[in-house]
Amino acid sequence: MSYIEQFCESAIAKGDGTSSNDHEYFESMKKSIRNLVYYSELLPLLNHKNEWVVCWVASHLLANGYHTEALKSLNKLATGNGMASFSAVITIQEYKRGCFKSPFG
């Protein structure tokens, strides 16, 4: 399984963070991100069908220099309903305040 596939599977399984395995899914996403050679490999995931994949990857890319691409995806996600949309709104707000960092360190 590729790091991209591992990231997607973990982000989908993590969902809104209410799983009993939440920490494991987060660590799996973090490991996947850290093993990528280029963050640009994540750009196609900004168009993923799963909103949690989009939210997590956009958050990481936003903190790592891909501002235009990430904000476009987060703004689109923010127009929806649900927890992923709320997360996108908060991420955008924190970025605008100047205190946003990657959720993966």
Image (cartoon, grey):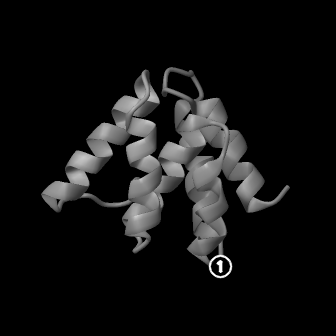
Report the residue at 14% width, 56% height from top. 97
* Residue under label 1: 37
Q: Residue furthest right?
A: 1
Tell me residue 62's x, y (percent).
39, 62
Report the residue at 65% width, 31% height from top. 13
Q: Residue furthest left?
A: 97
Tell me residue 7's x, y (percent).
66, 51
State whether residue 97 appears in this view: yes
For the C terminus, give its image quadrant.
bottom left
Report the residue at 40% width, 53% height from top. 103
Total marks shown come to 1
Query: Element under label 1?
Result: loop
Up-down relation of residue 71 to residue 11 (above or below): below
The residue under label 1 is which amino acid type? Val
Up-down relation of residue 93 to residue 61 (above or below): above
Horizontal side of 101 relative to 93 (left or right) equals right
Tell me residue 87's x, y (percent).
37, 36
| Quarter residue 36 falls in | bottom right
For the N terminus, give its image quadrant.
bottom right
| Quarter residue 50 falls in | top right
